[in-house]
Amino acid sequence: MKAKGWKELAIGGRIDEAGNAKDFETGSWRTFRPVRDESKCTNCLLCWIYCPDSAVAVKDGKVKGIDYEHCKGCGICAEVCPPKIKAIEMVQEGMEKEEEQE
């Protein structure tokens, strides 16, 4: 049986098989990227909890970095980073800090 395309579905219809964002690199969409200052980060993991793209990499309870292939640059991680810490800064794409390029 051939699967129906979206045009063949009834209004309000659904597709039984959901996709998975990890199969698609979407990082090229962004205009700003989050840059994390490791020296300021307290590993509170708020960025990881709130990231809608699961782009914050965590290992052993600590933030290890950001998956730029999947990060869309929404800025939620920078927004939820505690105000007194501000370990994440949104930087215009192509204007990365020198440390990040190394």
Image (cartoon, rainbow, N blue to C red):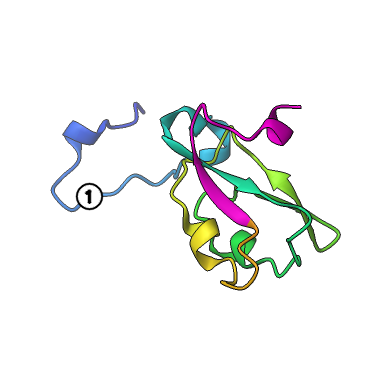
Callout 1: SS: loop
User: How far across and down, in percent of the image, does residue 90 sit?
Assistant: 51, 47
- Work out which quarter of the rendered image holds the N terminus and state it: top left
84 vs 19, nearest the viewer: 84
In the visual, does 44 lie left or right of 90? right
Tell me which segment is drawn in magenta: 88-102
- The answer to whether residue 93 shows anywhere in this view is yes
Disc 1 residue type?
Gly
In this view, 66 is above or below 2? below
* Residue 8 in magenta stretch: no
Crowdedness near tag 1: few (<14), some (14–19) or many (≥20) residues, C-alpha within 10 Å: few
In this view, 74 is above or below 98? below
Name the residue that disc number 1 marks: 13
Q: Residue at x 17, y 32 (%)?
A: 7
- Work out which quarter of the rendered image holds the C terminus and state it: top right
User: How far across and down, in percent of the image, does residue 75 sit?
Assistant: 47, 52
User: How far across and down, in percent of the image, does residue 2 sit?
Assistant: 34, 26
User: How far across and down, in percent of the image, does residue 63 sit?
Assistant: 75, 55
Q: Residue at x 58, y 66 (%)?
A: 81
